Image (cartoon, coloured by chain):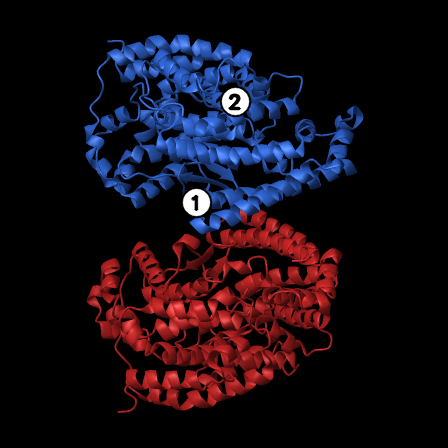
Chain colours: A red, B blue
Amino acid sequence: MNKTAEKLKEYMKKFQQYQTIEALLSWDLSTMTPEKGIESKTDALGYFSTESFRLATSKEYGEILKELSAPEQFQQLDDAMKVTVRRELRDYERFVRVPEKFYTEYVTLKARSQKAWESAKKANDFSVFAPYLDKVISMTKQYVRYMEPDQKPYEVLLDLFEEGMNSAAIDRIFDELKVGLRPLLEKIKASRQPDLSALQGKYDIQAQKKVQDMLLSYIGFDFTQGATAESEHPFTTEIGSGDVRVTNHYKEDDPIAAMFSAIHEGGHAIFGQNIDPSYENTAVMQVNLMGLHESQSRFYENILGRNPNFWSPVYSKLGELLPNFKEIPFDTFCQAINYVQPSLIRVDADEVTYCLHIILRYEIERAIFNDEVTTEELPQLWNDKMEELLGIRPSSDAEGILQDMHWSDGSFGYFPSYLLGSVYDGMFLQQIEKELGSIDDLLAQGKVLEITKWLNTNIHQYGSLYTSREVIERLCGKELSAQPLLDYFNKKYNTIYSLDH
Amino acid sequence: MNKTAEKLKEYMKKFQQYQTIEALLSWDLSTMTPEKGIESKTDALGYFSTESFRLATSKEYGEILKELSAPEQFQQLDDAMKVTVRRELRDYERFVRVPEKFYTEYVTLKARSQKAWESAKKANDFSVFAPYLDKVISMTKQYVRYMEPDQKPYEVLLDLFEEGMNSAAIDRIFDELKVGLRPLLEKIKASRQPDLSALQGKYDIQAQKKVQDMLLSYIGFDFTQGATAESEHPFTTEIGSGDVRVTNHYKEDDPIAAMFSAIHEGGHAIFGQNIDPSYENTAVMQVNLMGLHESQSRFYENILGRNPNFWSPVYSKLGELLPNFKEIPFDTFCQAINYVQPSLIRVDADEVTYCLHIILRYEIERAIFNDEVTTEELPQLWNDKMEELLGIRPSSDAEGILQDMHWSDGSFGYFPSYLLGSVYDGMFLQQIEKELGSIDDLLAQGKVLEITKWLNTNIHQYGSLYTSREVIERLCGKELSAQPLLDYFNKKYNTIYSLDH
C-alpha cells in the first residue's frame, strides 16, 4: 500500500474511534442514563461529533482523498479501498459545501423538532409540531441543495439512505405492489378472522427476556460479539468492531411484539456481526444501505419468523421458558403471528398491509419535495391516503401523521427502504429456495442456521462493498421486481386463510 | 472572571468530556462488553486517553496555569478556582517531567502486569507474576522520581492518593491502632463464637438485586442521578455530571456480601451525587482524596450498616424481598454481620481485623520503597507479617500476596487510604453524636437520611475543596487520632461479645 493510502487508513481508524464512543454514548442514553445524567451525555455527544466532523472536513483529509482518486493511484487500490475513496470523497465534497453555520443551526433545529414531535404526539396536537416540521422541511431542502446543487432534492435523499436508488425505480416497484396487493387484501378482508382470545394474559418480563435470548441464539446471533438491553424503542447498533448490540421493549400483555422485535433486530445484528473483518478501516464496514439492512432484519422477522415451520422445532421450548404458551394451541399461535387486517399504526401492522403504510409515506414525501403540498395540509393528505390505500381513517393525528419519529429529525427518504427491503427479500427467497430447497422444509427440520449461513456467505460478509442493486444482480441475475414478494404473499395467505377454497 | 480564568474553565470542560467517555468506556468494559468487543473498547480508551493527556500537557495549558498562579491574578480567584490552579499546575508540572516514551512504556507494562497477576492468582503461582511486579516496582519508583525529583518516592505516592498525608502521620496512627486493637482481639478470640448455620441456603439473585435497590434508596442514593449494574468486582464511577453509578457482584450462597457491597458503594456514590454543582468545571468536582472517599463508603458500610439498629426498621422488608430472611432470627443476622475472626482475605475481613490487613500492606509497601526487601522475598514477608499481626499463616500465595490487584497496576500508596477512612470515621462519628445525638437512636427510628443530610452538608457538598486533614480540622477541631475508632470498636464489641461479663 502506498503512503497516501496508509494515511487514509489512519483517518478511517480515527473515525472508527469516534464512531465507537458516539455509538456508546447513544446506547447508554437509550438504555441506561439516569434523568440527571442526560445533559452531560448529550453534551459529550455534541462535543465529539463536532470533533469528528472537523476531522472529516479537514483540508488534509480532502487532499488525501483527491490524491487517491486520481486514475493512476485509484487503479492500484483494492476493491474495498476503491469503494472507500469514492464514497468518502463524495461525502467530503458534500459536507464541505454545507456552510458550518447552517449545519449547526440544522442540527440544533432537528434536536428541538424531535422534542416538539414528542410533545405533539403526547398531546395529540399537530399544531404543536407543525412550525418545527415546516422549518425542518425547508432546511432539509436547503441542506440537500448545498450538498448536491445540481440534483433534485428528493433523489439525493433517496440515494443517501439507499445508494443508487431513485424515484423512477421506486415508482415502478411500488405501483406493481399497489396493484398486486389489492385483490389479496380484498379476499382476506372477506374471509373469516381467527379467534385469538387464547393469547390474552400476563407474560412475565424476565421470562420474555429468556425467550429473546433463545430466539437470538436460534437464528445465529453471536453473544461473544453482541449484547442485549432494554430501551423505549428496539434498535441495533455497532459499538466498535466485534460488538453489535440489540435492544428490546417488553410489555406484560404482548409477548409476541417483543419476540418479533428480537428476531428483527437479530437480523440486523447478524448482518453486522458477519462482515469480513479484513474490511476493517474501510468504508465497507459501514452499511449505510438501509434497504439492504432492512432486507436482512425483515427476512428474519417475516419470511422466516412468521413461517409456522420456524416455530415447530422450538414451540415446546417456548412453553418451557414462558409457561403461558403451554396453554396456547400451536395453530392459534401461528394464526396470531400471521393475522392480516388494515390498521392505523405502521409498527403494529402485519407484513401485508405494512407495504401500504410505506407507500403512503413515500407518496407524501415525494409530494413534499415536489412542493405539491403545504405543511398545513399534511394531516388531511395523510388521512385521505389512509382511506384510499387501507380503507380506514385515523380519528386523530396521533394515530395518523404524528405516529412516526422520522420526519421530525429530517430523515425524509428513509421510509422507502423498509419496503425495498421486503421486495429484495422476495427475490432472495426465490434464490435461496433454488439453491437450498424449500424453506418450509429447512425450517421444519430446525435448520435455520443453514439459511443464516447462506446469507452470511452471499450477503453479509461483503458489508457495503456492493450496492443493493449490485447484490441482487450478482445473486439473482435479474432486475429488481416486486413479483417474487407478491408470489410469496399470495402463496402464503391463500393457504393460511384458505382463500382458494 | 478574567479571560485567562475563562480559558482555564474551557479546558476543564474539555477534560470533563474526555473523563465522561473514558469512564463510560471503562464502565461498559466491566459491565457489558462482549468478549470480541473488548479490543475495540480498549483501543478507543487508549486513543482518547492519549488525546486528553496531550491536552493536559500542552504548552498553552501550562501557560494558562502559570499565568493564573502569579500572585496578583491568583488573589482574585475564588476558593474553588484557587484549588484548581494550584492542583492542576502541580499535576501539569509533574506530568511534563515524565518523558513520553517512558510513560507509554509504563502504561503498557501495567496493563500486561495486571493480566500476569490474574493468571498468577488463578494458577496460585507467584513466580508467574514476580518478573512483572519487579518491573512495576522499579518503573513506579522511576515514575515518581520523574514527577518529584526532590521527594522520597513513597511520600509522593501517599500524597497522590491522599493529598497532604505522609508516612510520619500514618506511622503514628497505625501504631496507635496496632497497640489498641491487640487486647480487644485477644478478648474476642477467647469468647464464644455465634452459631450462624441458619444463614446457609440459596438466595435468588433477582431478589438480591431488589434488596440492593431498597438499601440504596434507604441510605439516600438518588436514582435520578445514578444507576446500577453487575460486574466482577463492585465499584463506583461518575460518568459525567449528574450520573454516579455503582456495580455489585452477586452470589447465590452469600447475600450478605452483596448487601454490604451495595451499602459501601452507595456511600461512595452519595458523596459524588451531592457535590455542589456550582463547582462544575473546577478541580473540586474530582475527589482524588481516597482516604476521604473511603471514609464515606466505610461509614455507611461499617458504622451505619453493621449497627443492628440500622436493620431493625427494615428487617421485615428484607424478609419480604428475600423470603429466606423470614426464617433467620434478627439476632443471628446481627451476629453474622459483626462476626469477628482473623482471616486471610482482606475483602472478606470483618471491620476490626480489616485494620491489620491494611497495616500489613502499608508496612510492606514502605519496605519496598525503602529498598529493604526484594521482590523475591515478598511472599515470605507477607506470610510472616500475617502471622505476627493476625496469628494465622496463608497456605498459598493466592491466599497471601496474590489476593489484591493494587500492586499489579502500580497503585502503591493506595492501601493506607482504606484504613485512614475508618480512622476519620471514628472522628466523624464522635462529632455527629455530639450534634445529632445517639446514632443508635437515629437508626432505630429509621432516620438514616438525617445522618446522610449531615454528611451532605458537612462533607459531600465541598467535593475536594478541602483536604481530609482540613475537613477533620474544620469539623472536629482536633488533630487526627485513632482513639475514637478504637473507642467505637471497644464499646461495640464489648456489647456484642459480652466481653465485660
> Please, is residue B155 above or below residue B316 in the view?
above
> Please, is residue A288 above or below residue B470 in the view?
below
Tag 2 residue: B413
Distance, label 1 to label 2, CA atoms, is 27 Å
- Measured from the top left, where is residue B157 in percent x and y? 57, 22
The chain that hosts pointer 2 is B
- Looking at the image, residue B188 sits to the left or right of residue A60; the answer is left
**Quarter-of-image position of residue A380:** bottom right
- Helix, strand or loop for disc 2: loop
- Measured from the top left, where is residue A342 in percent x and y? 40, 81
Name the quadrant of the C terminus of chain A.
bottom left
Q: Give the residue displayed 76% in from the left and 34% down from the top.
A: B64
- Measured from the top left, where is residue B394 in percent x and y? 33, 20
The chain that hosts pointer 1 is B
Q: Are marks 1 and 2 in contact (CB under 8 Å)?
A: no
Q: Nearer the viewer, residue B249 or B499?
A: B249
Tag 1 residue: B31
Residue A226 seen from this side: no
> Please, is residue B132 above or below residue A234 in the view?
above
- Measured from the top left, where is residue A222 in percent x and y? 40, 57
Name the quadrant of the N terminus of chain A.
bottom right
**What amino acid type should be assigned to the residue bearing mark 1?**
Thr
**What amino acid type should be assigned to the residue bearing mark 2?**
Gly
For the residues tagged 1 and 2, is the chain the same? yes
Sort mark 2 into few (<14), some (14-19) or many (20+) by Cα contacts within 10 Å. many
Q: Give the residue displayed 31% in from the left and 69% down from the top.
A: A447
Q: Mark 1 or mark 2: name the one nearer the start of the chain.
A: 1
Residue B271 seen from this side: yes
How many circles with numbers are drawn on the protein? 2
